[in-house]
Image (cartoon, rainbow, N blue to C red):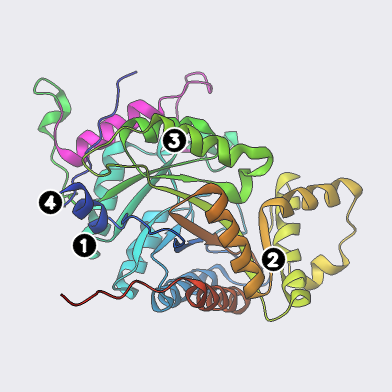
Amino acid sequence: MSEPTTATGTTTGGPAERAEAAGLGRRTPGRAVLSVLDLATVGAGVPVTRALRDTAELAQLAERLGYRRFWVAEHHGMPAVASASPPVVLGHLSAVTSTIRLGSGGLMLPNHAPLAVAEQFATIGAFAPGRVDLGLGRAPGTDQLTAYALRRRMEDDRTDDMADRLAELQHFLRGDFAGDHPFGRIRVVPDPTGLVVWLLGSSDYSARLAGRLGLPFAFAHHFAGMGGTTEQALDVYRSSFRPSELLDAPYSMIGVNALAADDEESAAYQAAAGALSMVLLRQGRLQETPTPEQAAVYPYTPADRATIQAMRGTALVGTAEQIVDGLDDLVRRLEVDELMVTTQVHGAAVRRRSYELVAQAWTARQPAEPTPVAG
């Protein structure tokens, strides 16, 4: 397979200036950045139209609260998730926000033609200059039948052309195909300069590729962090990292499933809905996110309870102080630059309240910036 190259069309200046402009400024010891991952969750009894409006309102709230970026994820055929098309959702979010970075978390590149991805995100970038992230994954984001319907490819399902597709996409973004390449005559319009490519993963494949290309890396700790896999992936990323035009040192982020409420009992009650939704999903029972009332009376089997117990190993549920304690612990142990919080509950008001509580407690906990000394 061909080797992707590193540049993504960033601003001029030194590595530090380029990284800062791309929302990848280095953290100082004891500090990290919070961001938001949203799935446009559809709760039982909630119209999809309302769920998408809730996502827009959450993006506006996240911007006011000071979260760095707001990403939406690509999933298909799931009644509980309305973000099947991240570019469409992000196009709308670009019109209702002004400062927060917007991105895909992620866009499943094997489902899409690289040129189409470049054009779509360049268009979003024209609406929101300098604040668009193109987070890329390689999973289908759905079942195999739906993946086939999306891709229409007859080759063996085990064929993995992620690196080739990424290389082609980056050539489109930079306009630097080799002189004899037929795609060299194709121009991406609008100009894609300023898009920031991330690689996302739940194993060490994307970690290694991101390191080799000098790209920022996000690991799906929120659903794949059991058994030390997060530490392993981050170690692979850092050990394989090569400086690039964008980054002179690794930049890592992890997803964190977190729910804060005014008291522990309320948090546990609301979190049960998201946990039941995951149990049903893993059983192939696709439906909207249950209500907490439904979760409270559901007839859980011993296997269901074991699944929920395992998920709790990477979830943070409790008061705002308890959540921030957990976030602080992740930063200390994993030395990540950024934490992307996702909150899977039934109600939008509960979700918004959780992000408010976390932001307030996190800001209060962070050490103050040093005061410059007058010369």
Q: Quadrant of residue 93?
A: bottom left
Give the residue type that dot 2 points to: Val
Q: Secondary structure at mark 2?
A: strand
Name the residue beneath numbered marker 3: 237
Decide which of tag 4 and tag 3 comes sooner along the chain.
4
Q: Residues within 10 Å of mark 4 (few under 14, many from 20)?
A: few
Q: Secondary structure at mark 4?
A: loop
Residue 151 is at least partly visible in this image? no
Decide which of tag 2 and tag 4 comes sooner along the chain.
4
Seen at 34% across and 75% down, the residue is 96
Q: Position of residue 131 (x, y in %)?
A: 28, 61
Q: Quadrant of residue 33?
A: bottom left
Could you give the CA–CA distance between mark 2 and mark 4, rounded to whole angstroms?
Answer: 42 Å
Give the residue type that dot 1 points to: Pro
Seen at 63% across and 61% down, the residue is 326
Picture layout, residue 36 above or below residue 158: below
Seen at 48% across and 21% down, the residue is 159
Q: Position of residue 308 (x, y in %)?
A: 78, 53
Is residue 170 in the magenta section? yes
Left or right for 311, reference 174: right
Q: Residue furthest front?
A: 375
Left or right for 243, reference 302: left
The total number of labels drawn is: 4
Q: Position of residue 189 (x, y in %)?
A: 15, 49
Quadrant for the N terminus, please.
Answer: top left
Q: Disc 2 or disc 4, which is closer to the eye?
A: 4
Name the residue beneath numbered marker 4: 13
Is residue 339 in the magenta section? no
Using the image, tell me which numbered label, if any, was put on residue 317. Answer: 2
